[in-house]
Amino acid sequence: MSPQIPGQITYDIPQQEIMSSGHLACPGCGASLCMRIALKIFGPRTVLCVPACCWAVIDGPFPYSAAGVPVVHCAFETAAITATGVRHGLDIRGIKDCTVVAWAGDGGTFDIGFGALSATVERNENIAYVCYDNEAYMNTGIQRSSATPIGAWTSTTPGEHPKEEPKKNLVEIMAAHRIPYVATATVAFMDDLTRKLKRIRDMEGTRLLHIFSPCPPGHKSLESDSIKISRLAVETKVFPLYEIENGLKYTLNHKPKGIPVQEYTRLQGRFKHLTEEDLKQMQQRVDYEWDVLDKRISLFA
Amino acid sequence: MQKVLTGNQTVSWGVMRARAQVIAAYPITPQTTIIEELANLVDEGKLEASFIKVESEHSALAGCIGAAQAGARTFTATSAQGLALMHELIHWASLGRLPIVLADVNRAMAPGWTIWTDQNDSLSQRDTGWLQFYCESNQEVMDTAIQAFKIAEIVKLPVMLVLDAFFLSHTAEAVDIPEPEEVDKFLPPYEADLKVDFDNPRAFSGMTGVDIYQEFRYLQHEAMNEALTVTEKVDQEYGKQFGRTYGLVEPYRCEDAEAIIVTTATATSTAREVIDQWRDRGESVGLLKIRTFRPFPTELVREALRGVPKVGILDRNICPGFGGIFAQEIKASMYDMEEKFRPDIYGFIAGLGGRDITPDTINEILEKTIHPEKTEKHLNWIALRD
Ligand SMILES: Cc1ncc(C[n+]2csc(CCOP(=O)(O)OP(=O)(O)O)c2C)c(N)n1
Ligand SMILES: [Mg+2]
């Protein structure tokens, strides 16, 4: 490597691609970009445990695989425990220098796989868990999950009846388990994302990264807006970037600009039915949740 | 080494001798003492294994699947509700061709809540592609546990080791425990040919198109067929080394029998006694024990029952609206036998929900088989209360 010239901009994401380009993700898919970056950071000695979700498709049909590392497909609700089993299996065979990753959608994490995840965290199994959160069951055609935000259209919260319940707060639930490390990330903040990926690669114990993941067909957004939407999710305080160590030590990783929520919702057809009044309420909710987080951060910094 | 062990302890000691590497399990009566004993064996360093103390049976089997995919020898145990909860993964383990061994302590399904034995829990997993071995004694449990890992690893299918609740699980008998070095000779360390491997990264169990799924099923089916000869061979090999074999079926005093009763599991021991009594009285009756439900020993059953005039089948299970499950299998096996050799077959249901199968039960079945004037061919309930 040539010596660094003072002031020269460097970017330490490895050039080498592990994932191949022939995968089956839709254009603009946040989840495929997350994986591409994650594998660059995790490196080739990574096992991916992938439950039913878009990523079970994205990787490609038998005998193909785009990931470039061993992939253990598993039942929908078993990402955390399958990864646990793989970890124990490799450990007892003396294969320790590798990262075992559960890579699951929001449905597999917040809903059907939640019991197994909670138990895995409670036992502090030595796995990295990445939830790419596209805020609905996208693989089966955009049905609501408990990660779907209030007010969003999905195919099971249709027409006049968008989702009435707020999004489940996964990060706080994980913190309540006193998980060694939990953090949020998006593909719009690459330095932050890669730092967190390194962190979960290099730690021991259960660590969870919750990545907001735009989905053009599911969010009814433009393929070219995925990064922008990711950025706006953070800057509007809808999806703050923060991390919690041992369930108690909070760190805010990016101070959001506090852009109006409408800037975020207007790029996504899933929110297009929202009235002025709805948006006002949504703004109030976002502000309220932000205040709660802010207080926690100052209390537990 | 001889030790007095319950059926459940025997399972645990068999698993220790087999050097299972990853165990994931969740407690349920009557299985619990298997995993408690394993926890002790691991804790005392007698078994070098990881024991994942999961939050459900569903995760127990999923954990084994992950560990097996990583190339480890794996074990779990359960009963009834637990096995039913595993069902999705029961399929997964077999189609994923993972040689997991699972001990199922037969327990009747709820409701109403019951902890007593019958076979509906394991038999309702019939079409999942698992081998199923039904044991008659604690010694057979020990020997089958060790054989199970070997067979599973050869045919690349999971094996269910089945034992009756309480009649075996909590009943102590003297058991000969093979020496570790001897077992190591019989069962070398597991070497999976396909597993998580960073030098040869593969995707396991991914999306499978219409062009190839059926072929995976064909291979699974062929593996089950292969399991017939492999089970036989492994049992013989075991016999050479340890002096005990069981076969896939065991005909007992069947020579020139007018009638044969077919049994499984512990009911067999009771039936042996009764057959001896009848033989002593000069009656030509015999017993056929079926040990392996899958692979189903069709040819051996046909051979044993060919030309026998009357056959009574004791089922400690029920396929509601149809009848006994072993009866169903046996009848299907006999369908294309020449008529003159094909026995009259009578089905009997007894001992559900742990009700005792006594010598009287067996006597009644034999009576009704030999004198079938008032016997229904398809299905007869024994000791049914009004
Ligand atoms: C036990 C079970 N129930 C339902 C399904 C069908 N299913 C497959 S993927 C999926 C939704 C996945 O949603 P999520 O985890 O959010 O991932 P995404 O598809 O959005 O990437 C569902 C419902 C299944 N495979 N298994
Ligand atoms: Mg989703």
Image: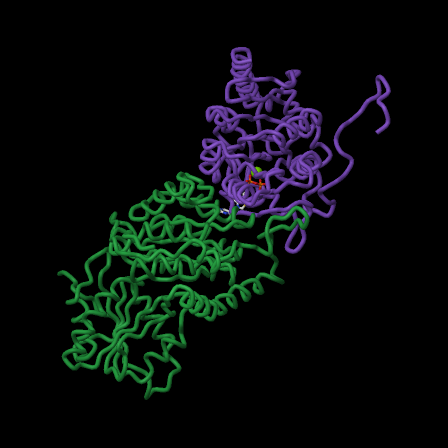
Where is residue A179 shown, x and y percent of the image?
51, 27
- Answer above or below: position of B162 versus A204: below
| Residue nearest the viewer, comparing B134 with B174 | B174
Quadrant of ligand 2 in image: top right
Residue A98, by quadrant, is top right
Depth check, front residue: B341 or A84: A84
In the rendered image, the quadrant that contains the C terminus of chain A is top right
Provide the letter of the chain coloured purple: A
| Residue projecting furthest to the bottom | B340
Residue B202 x, y percent position in the rendering: 64, 51
**Nearer to us in this view, A103 or B1:** B1
Q: Where is B367 relative to A161, above or below?
A: below
Q: Which residue lies at the image location 60% right of the left edge and 61% below the top edge?
A: B210
- Please give the letter of the chain rendered in green: B
Lateral position of residue B266 relative to residue A220, left or right: left
B121 up-or-down from B277: above or below: above
Q: Position of residue B94 (x, y in %)?
A: 49, 57
Q: Position of residue B61 (x, y in %)?
A: 45, 48
User: Which quarter of the figure is the N terminus of chain A placed in?
Assistant: top right
- Residue B329 is left or right of residue A96, and the answer is left
Model colouring: by chain
Q: Residue at x 33, y 66 (%)?
A: B325
Q: Residue at x 40, y 72 (%)?
A: B297
From the viewer's perspective, is residue A74 above or below residue A150?
A: below
Q: How many marks?
A: 0
